[in-house]
Image (tube, coloured by chain):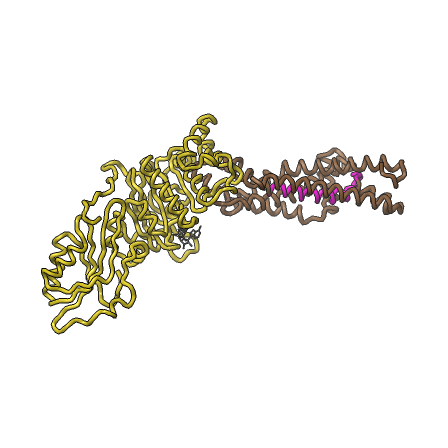
């Protein structure tokens, strides 16, 4: 798997202005000790799926609600599809919102309307004639796999079906961007997988631009091209999902990544290893294999070339999108210069090698 | 028709029943007509509403509470000048509708407001996110979503009005309650009193069942 040449995700169309540009967003709720958003800036390119991940209370909902001005930031600019929303009046804002779809954690469907009625709602609000609305609904129902549920009321639907309605409704007016606020957080794992697959499919078919927020790294891994990590109202890290996953920098990011990558060293593993022999160095290395390297070949070759004992204490091979990668934690025993030489050699191959403190025992 | 009553009273009963029906129906109709906009205004101007405004919300809320906390029998007398202005007279079934409608408007406005408050904020937010105008949110989200609650509020109001209408005798409004007091109580005719009570119970039961049935029908969606 790792031997194949990595095929990167199709890069977002270059040059064009970003579909969403948030600049210096700040929002402090009255009476709150700290701002919910503290100078957040990010850009979502057209055709890109951008994820924002953060713990509870990090400010994710506030951030995404700022993107269509459901929440008005105290400071900063919100530009969507080339329009500065913060400068729009009520009518302009309504018009702009019709070009922004939104999917909600708790679906927020109208109980008084059928599935078809819910999906038609944004069109009705926009004054689209009935015949056109019906045609669009007929088009959307099979797209989200709800052709049979056209006339059902939300009360009769499962959570997954409700979210499908929510997604169809968000897409009804062919929005230029889609905002997803924890779209799968109210669903069980199987249904979550279903909805993620649906979003991935729609994304590919409709070339959607998506800004989504989540507290689950699995969602980011399944859908996103880029990700920003939000903590206490600030972006503490952002980049391509592959980079953030394989080489997380901030402690919070590492914890998120550990949830899905699972490359932490099992407890007790290090304690069970022998102490270094006389004159020997003992190092704990985290080696990231991305691209055309086989993990096993590199480990055995390093061992042979530099006369090291390399003990694999944890390992994980995975892929993000079409990009495979492997992460190994190695306990390396050998003469100090030989270990250094081996590290340099691996880096020379393009592998990322991080020194881990022996005591930490985790990535 | 009612075997245990002297035939001469039957006409009186018929007339009284009709008067009760008229007072309750007319007052309820007016109350809904004015109460719904009032409730929508209270709801919209409340903090976090569609158009928050303490300057509108507080005086309006105070007014509604003032009407609600005045005992009906006192309200009826206190607003006689207003009644005369509206109905041209302060005596009779038509005149009795005025205080009944006023009390019921305040009553139903609060109940409506509660029903509107039960509408999921998320749904309103979704409509806002889709670019709905405030009027569209009221007409297409708030009212339809709150409909079962609004209907239940109308039922409760109708039932209360039946009770209030019994006091309308004080201004010559007639009705079943008045009949019960004049004949049953003042002329010592317990069979009349019993019949009035029975009819009122049947009437209220009928209203309640109808209301519940409608709410259930809507709730089943
Ligand atoms: N309307 C509000 N009024 C006051 N404080 C608020 C409001 N909305 C959010 N906050 C506060 O702002 C901070 C960020 O909230 P936000 O809902 O954006 O977090 P979140 O990352 O979405 O969390 P979660 O994962 O729990 O949904 C929190 O401390 C929260 O208490
Ligand atoms: Mg949230």
Please state the extent of the stretch shown in magenta in the rendering.
Answer: B149-175
Task: Name the foreground residue: B41 vs B213.
Answer: B213
State which chain is coloured brown: B
Can residue B196 be seen from the camera position used here? Answer: yes
Secondary structure mostly seen in magenta is helix
Front-most of residues B136 and B146: B146
Q: Colour of chain A?
A: yellow
Question: Percent x, y for residue A199?
Answer: 36, 41
Q: Is residue B139 above or below residue A268?
A: above
Can residue A89 be seen here? The reply is no
User: Which image quarter: residue A327?
Assistant: bottom left
Magenta segment includes A56: no
Question: Which image quadrant: the C terminus of chain B?
Answer: top right
Pinpoint residue B215: horizontal percent, then vertical percent.
62, 41
Which quarter of the rendered picture does the N terminus of chain B lie within?
Answer: top right
* Residue A92 pos. (x, y %): 40, 34
- Residue shown at 11% from the left, 67% from the top: A335
Horizontal side of residue B85 vs A272, given as left or right: right
Q: Looking at the image, is A135 positioned above or below residue A361? A: above
């Amino acid at each position: 798997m790792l031997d194949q040449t990595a095929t990167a995700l199709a890069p977002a169309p270059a040059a064009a202005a970003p579909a969403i540009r948030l600049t210096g967003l700040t929002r402090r709720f009255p009476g709150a000790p700290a701002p919910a958003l503290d100078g957040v800036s990010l850009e979502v390119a057209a055709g890109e799926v951008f994820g924002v991940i953060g713990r509870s209370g990090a400010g994710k909902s506030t951030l995404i609600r700022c993107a269509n001005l459901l929440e008005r930031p105290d400071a900063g600019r919100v530009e969507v599809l080339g329009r500065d929303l913060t400068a729009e009046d009520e009518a302009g804002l309504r018009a702009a919102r019709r070009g922004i779809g939104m999917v909600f954690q708790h679906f927020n469907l109208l109980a008084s309307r059928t599935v078809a009625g819910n999906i038609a709602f944004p069109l009705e609000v926009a004054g689209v004639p009935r015949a056109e609305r019906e045609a669009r609904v007929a088009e959307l129902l099979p797209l989200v796999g709800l052709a049979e549920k056209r006339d059902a009321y939300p009360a009769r639907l499962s959570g997954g079906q409700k979210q499908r309605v929510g997604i169809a409704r968000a897409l009804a007016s062919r929005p230029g961007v889609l905002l997803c606020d924890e779209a799968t957080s109210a669903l069980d794992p199987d249904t979550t997988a279903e909805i993620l697959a649906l979003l991935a499919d729609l994304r590919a078919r409709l070339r959607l631009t998506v800004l989504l927020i989540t507290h689950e790294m699995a969602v980011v891994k399944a859908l996103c091209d880029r990700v920003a990590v939000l903590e206490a109202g600030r972006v503490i890290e952002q980049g391509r999902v592959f980079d953030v996953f394989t080489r997380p920098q901030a402690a919070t990011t590492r914890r998120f990544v550990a949830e899905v990558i699972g490359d932490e060293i099992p407890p007790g593993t290090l304690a069970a290893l022998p102490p270094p022999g006389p004159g020997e160095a003992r190092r704990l290395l985290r080696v990231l294999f991305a691209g055309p390297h086989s993990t096993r070949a590199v480990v055995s070759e390093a061992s042979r070339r530099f006369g090291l004992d390399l003990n694999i204490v944890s390992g994980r091979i995975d892929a993000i999108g079409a990009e495979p990668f492997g992460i190994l934690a190695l306990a390396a025993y050998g003469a100090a210069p030989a270990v250094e030489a081996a590290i340099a050699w691996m880096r020379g191959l393009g592998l990322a090698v991080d020194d881990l403190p022996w005591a930490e025992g985790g990535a | 028709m009612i075997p245990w009553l002297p035939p001469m009273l039957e006409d009186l009963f018929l007339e009284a029943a009709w008067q009760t029906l008229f007072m309750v129906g007319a007052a309820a109709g007016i109350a809904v007509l004015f109460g719904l906009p009032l409730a929508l205004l209270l709801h919209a101007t409340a903090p976090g509403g569609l158009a928050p405004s303490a300057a509108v919300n507080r005086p309006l809320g105070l007014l509604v509470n003032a009407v609600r906390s005045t005992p009906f029998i006192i309200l009826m007398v206190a607003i006689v000048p207003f009644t005369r202005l509206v109905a041209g007279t302060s005596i009779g079934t038509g005149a009795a509708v005025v205080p009944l409608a006023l009390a019921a408007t305040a009553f139903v406005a609060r109940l409506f407001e509660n029903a509107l408050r039960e509408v999921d904020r998320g749904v309103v937010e979704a409509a806002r996110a889709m670019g709905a105008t405030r009027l569209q949110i009221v007409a297409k989200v708030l009212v339809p979503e709150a409909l079962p609650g609004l209907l239940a509020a109308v039922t409760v109001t109708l039932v209360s009005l039946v009770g209030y209408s019994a006091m309308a005798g004080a201004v010559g409004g007639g009705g079943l309650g008045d009949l019960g007091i004049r004949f049953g109580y003042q002329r010592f005719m317990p069979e009349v009193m019993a019949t009035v009570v029975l009819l009122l119970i049947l009437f209220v039961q009928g209203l309640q069942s109808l209301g519940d049935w409608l709410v259930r029908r809507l709730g089943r969606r």
